[in-house]
Image (cartoon, helix red, strand yellow):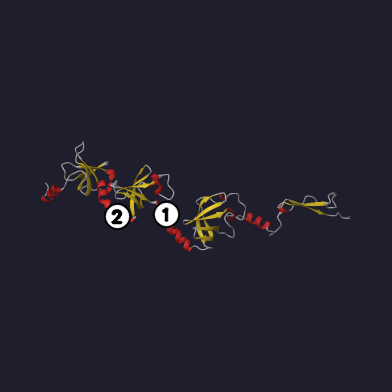
Amino acid sequence: MLTMEEAMKQSATRFAAGEIVKGTIIEVRPKEVLVDIGYKSEGVIPTNEFGDTSALKVGGEIDVLIEKLENKDGTVELSHEKAEFKKNWERILTICNEGGTIQGKVKSIVKGGLVVNIGVEAFLPASQIDVITPRNLAQFVNNTYEFKVVKINQERQNIVLSRRELIEQERNEKRAKLLAEMVPGDIRKGTVKNITDFGAFIELNGIDGLLHITDMSWGRISHPSEILKVGQEIDVVVLDVNKEKERVQPRPQAKNGQPVGQHRDQVSRRREGQGQGRQPRALRRLCATGDGGRGSRSRHRVVVDQTRGQAQRCAQTRPGN
């Protein structure tokens, strides 16, 4: 039996479509939640309007919006989600006008982007999810992120969000800080972002630098992919910093005196080409000799310089001539 106070509250409640009223949970079912709003019949709310149904307790109170006082089954159609939307609308307008940020949970995938629950349903275009538009949108569903409110339509009551702007803002701040701190000679850890025929682009915490193919190794390589791959982390030495263009010129840090991709045999060949150590076999080939004692008829020897493709003829006199 209702108490006098409960009866007065019930009589004061206006039961009309579009109104927000208090309701008491009387049963939680797999697909719906039964709520008593003090009307002649119970109300029904789909369970998908609640993020976590385990948090719903019988006897607990929630705000609901009346959609229909009586449907074909004789029950009241209610919506908890729309009640929260109506309550939060003014708060969202204040945040939007300030260009502020808000936390939200990605609810579902729609054409052109995602639906995000920020207290009200908002739209996140696919182009505003990340710096590079992702192909797989399903990976974001049911995850919670920070968003920036970029547009609002009060007549249609819809909101457009951006996650990309926050990511870019964070990267710009990191880039500015890094450029202010970085000086030539610094050793930094970078990641291979892209590989081309002429070199590789190295990302240093948001700043890109071109590592030319000629700076990768003392030895000759045909393509940067022979010693580097996309996503690989390498240590580089900063040769130059251009703060206006926000670019750096990197060079691989030498390990044991050798750049990236250097091998001992390459070092040996390089030293031989510079005239260090023993004379390389590839530089000279003895084609014929006049030994005098073995019946050789040649009176000359030819020295072939393979590095220049030239031949020298050196006269040699037989013994006794």
Residue in front for this viewpoint, 225 or 256: 225
Quickly name the residue at label 2.
94
How far from the left and from the top, in percent, is residue 31?
27, 41
- Residues tagged 1 and 2 counted as in contact (Cβ below 8 A): no
Q: Secondary structure at mark 2?
A: helix
Label 1: few (<14), some or many (≥20) within 10 Å? some
Q: Quadrant of the C terminus?
A: bottom right
How far from the left and from the top, in percent, is residue 232?
51, 52
Quickly name the residue at label 1.
168
Q: Residue furthest right?
A: 320
Q: Tell me if 1 is positioned left or right of 191 in this view.
A: left
How far from the left and from the top, in percent, is residue 155?
28, 47
Instruction: State the separation of the CA atoms marked 1 and 2.
Output: 24 Å
- The amino acid type, in three-letter code, at marker 1 is Glu
Residue 289 can be seen in this image: no
Residue at 45%, 58% in the rendered image: 175
Residue 214 can be seen in this image: yes
